[in-house]
Amino acid sequence: MDLTTIIETRPGVRSGKPCFVGTRIAVYDVLEYLAAGMTTEEIVTDFPELTPEHVRAAIEFAALRERRLATA
């Protein structure tokens, strides 16, 4: 998945945290919802501007970040 088409960082938006393109929803928020036990379906219902692909992108983003930290 090309995360650059789904996730962006904009200065002044959510303190520069990575957000989903065209929204103010941070990747971090979705990861926290998943960690709290929400399902993809519940997240998409609560945030209609998101799709299941956005949730998968958040997981992939976190995995890539973890991989970079582990190899640094």
Image (cartoon, grey):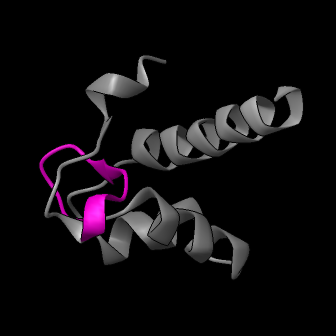
Q: Is residue 69 above or below residue 29?
A: above
Q: Residue furthest front?
A: 72
Residue in view at x 43 percent, y 38 percent: 53
**Residue 2 image position (x, y, % from top left):** 42, 17
Q: Is residue 10 left or right of residue 39?
A: left
Q: Is residue 21 magenta?
A: yes
Tell me: residue 39, above or below residue 52.
below
Q: Residue drawn at (49%, 18%), measured in percent from left and top?
A: 1
User: Count of labels shown?
Assistant: 0
User: Which quarter of the image is occupied by the C terminus?
Assistant: top right
Q: Reply above or below: 13 against 56.
A: below
Side of 23 relative to 47 (left or right):
left
What residue appears at the point 17 percent right and 63 percent down from the top-left corner? 13
Q: Image quadrant of residue 24?
A: bottom left
Instruction: Write down the region rendered in magenta.
Output: 15-24
Q: Residue 14, image x and y in percent?
A: 25, 69
Name the residue rendered at 31%, 34% in the picture: 6
